[in-house]
Image: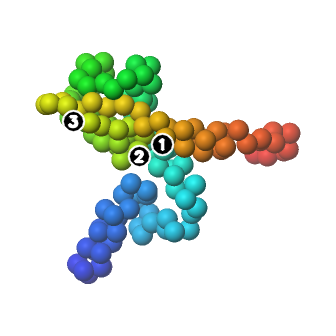
Amino acid sequence: MNRVVEKQIWNRCLFNRNIAIDMGASKTTEYSLKELGLARYAKALSHPARIAILQMLVKKQACVCGDIVDELPLSQSTVSQHLKELKEAGLIKGEIEGVSTCYCIDEKEWMKMAGLLGELLGAPVNTKKNCC
């Protein structure tokens, strides 16, 4: 493979890295906005640290500034990466207050996610058929 083609593939992977990794040119146009949104939320929920952060924010029902790092067994930089993922998915909002950033649940996006997950997980599954 020549260098130009390799660079084009690499650039496409970087552009689509939040949707699919190692799929080459991601075929995101083949999926509905609902499916893409659900995949974005699923990716955000795919790490226990992010689940813990969301649980903390939901439990406190307020913006949290410096407490997040103190309550997790992770370094500041690792927590920041997880917060970034949650923010990119739209599940949390962050406001800079002085030298720290305060985070809280984005209620509108949270309700969207709840609806999409509820629709998927609430669908009836026929377990009486012989399958696998």
Count residues near mark 1 (Cα–Cα under 10 Å), then give few for <14, some for 14-19, many for 20+.
some
* Residue positioned 41% across, 44% down in the render: 90
* Residue positioned 61% across, 41% down in the render: 115
- The quarter of the displayed image where residue 23 is located: bottom left
Query: Percent x, y for residue 130?
Result: 84, 44
- Residue 96, labelled with which disc? 3
Q: Is residue 92 visible?
A: yes
99 up-or-down from 118: above or below: above
- The quarter of the displayed image where residue 66 is located: top left
Quarter of the N terminus within the rendering: bottom left
Would residue 126 be found to the left or right of residue 38 on screen? right
Amino acid under label 3?
Answer: Ile
Which of the two discs, 1 and 2, sits closer to the camera? 1
> Marks 3 and 1: CB-CB under 8 Å?
no
- Residue 125, labelled with which disc? none
The mark total stands at 3
Amino acid under label 1?
Answer: Glu
Query: Percent x, y for residue 78?
Result: 25, 34
- Residue 89, labelled with which disc? 2
* Residue positioned 65% across, 44% down in the render: 120
Q: Which residue is more in the foreground, 25 or 101? A: 101
Count residues near mark 3 (Cα–Cα under 10 Å), then give few for <14, some for 14-19, many for 20+.
few
Give the spatial CA distance, label 1 vs label 2: 9 Å
Q: Which residue is mark 1?
A: 109
Which of the two discs, 2 and 3, sits closer to the camera? 3
Q: Which residue is more in the foreground, 40 or 109? A: 109
First along the sequence among labels 3 and 1: 3
Q: Say what secondary structure mark 2 lies in.
A: loop
Amino acid under label 2?
Answer: Ala
> Marks 1 and 2: CB-CB under 8 Å?
yes
23 up-or-down from 86: above or below: below
Query: Percent x, y for residue 121?
Result: 66, 39
